[in-house]
Image (tube, grey):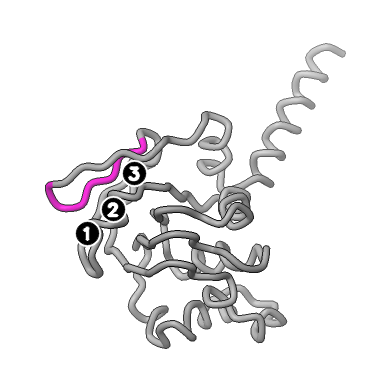
Amino acid sequence: MIFKGTIHRLGRDVDTDVIIPARYLSIPNMEELARHCMEDLDPEFTRKVKKGDLIFADENFGCGSSREHAPLVLKEIGISCIVAKSFARIFYRNAINVGLPILSCIDAADRANEGETAIIDVIKGSIRIGDQKFTAAPFPPFVLEIVQLGGLMPYVRKAIDASLIEREKRE
């Protein structure tokens, strides 16, 4: 899983209410909901993001409430991967559950500038910005498979299907 995209640089403590304000959570359509992503931080944010773009942020990205909508709207607007100095624990888990790859790397987050291009290899944990290379801890194999399959639900479906096939072979 290699991602190449434009960097959108964010600061520290970007909470889930900034990512997707609670006042919009009653919108049932994900495409419409995603139009409000980061609007209190930058009203033009969703117009700037292109499919495949990347977020680089400081500490505690995704803090606040445990809403799963936050990583979902980031995927919906086209963010392919997030690199931050650190993530709030529940956001980290929600991102994995919806298949949004996220990596912690202090040095890469410090080096990243708005508008630059980065290349991220999630499998190896490598991050390249210009001629500089950084390393993040790669995902354990089962987490990588969850992300590669698009989230926890496809991962569970695959496991159930494999179990059913194995059961049919035994019968």
- Looking at the image, do the residues carrying marks 2 and 1 touch, with CB atoms under 8 Å apart? yes
Q: Is residue 133 left or right of residue 148?
A: left
The amino acid on which the numbered mark 1 sits, given as a three-letter code, is Thr
Using the rendered view, name the quadrant where residue 78 is placed.
bottom left
Q: Residue at x 55, y 62 (%)?
A: 71
Which quadrant: the N terminus?
Answer: top left
Q: Is residue 34 above or below residue 124?
A: below
Using the rendered view, name the quadrant where residue 95 is placed.
bottom right
Q: Residue at x 60, y 53 (%)?
A: 98
Give the residue at mark 3.
2
Spatial separation of the CA atoms under disc 2 and disc 1? 7 Å
Disc 2 crowd, CA 10 A, few/some/many (<14, 14-19, 20+): some
Q: Residue at x 39, y 54 (%)?
A: 83
Q: Is residue 163 left or right of residue 124?
A: right
Q: Is residue 63 left or right of residue 159?
A: left
Q: Tell me residue 6's x, y (percent).
A: 27, 63
Give the residue at mark 1.
117
- Looking at the image, do the residues carrying marks 3 and 1 touch, with CB atoms under 8 Å apart? no
The region drawn magenta spans 125-131
Q: Is residue 63 above or below residue 124?
A: below
Give the residue at mark 2.
4
Q: Tell me residue 85's x, y (percent).
A: 40, 53
Residue extending farthest right: 171
Q: Is residue 38 above or below residue 61?
A: below
Disc 3 crowd, CA 10 A, few/some/many (<14, 14-19, 20+): some
Spatial separation of the CA atoms under disc 3 and disc 1? 13 Å
Q: Tell me residue 105's x, y (percent).
A: 36, 47
Front residue of this view, candidates 54 and 32: 54
Between marks 2 and 1 in the image, the one whose residue lies nearer the viewer: 1
Front residue of this view, candidates 116 and 77: 116
- Looking at the image, do the residues carrying marks 3 and 2 touch, with CB atoms under 8 Å apart? yes
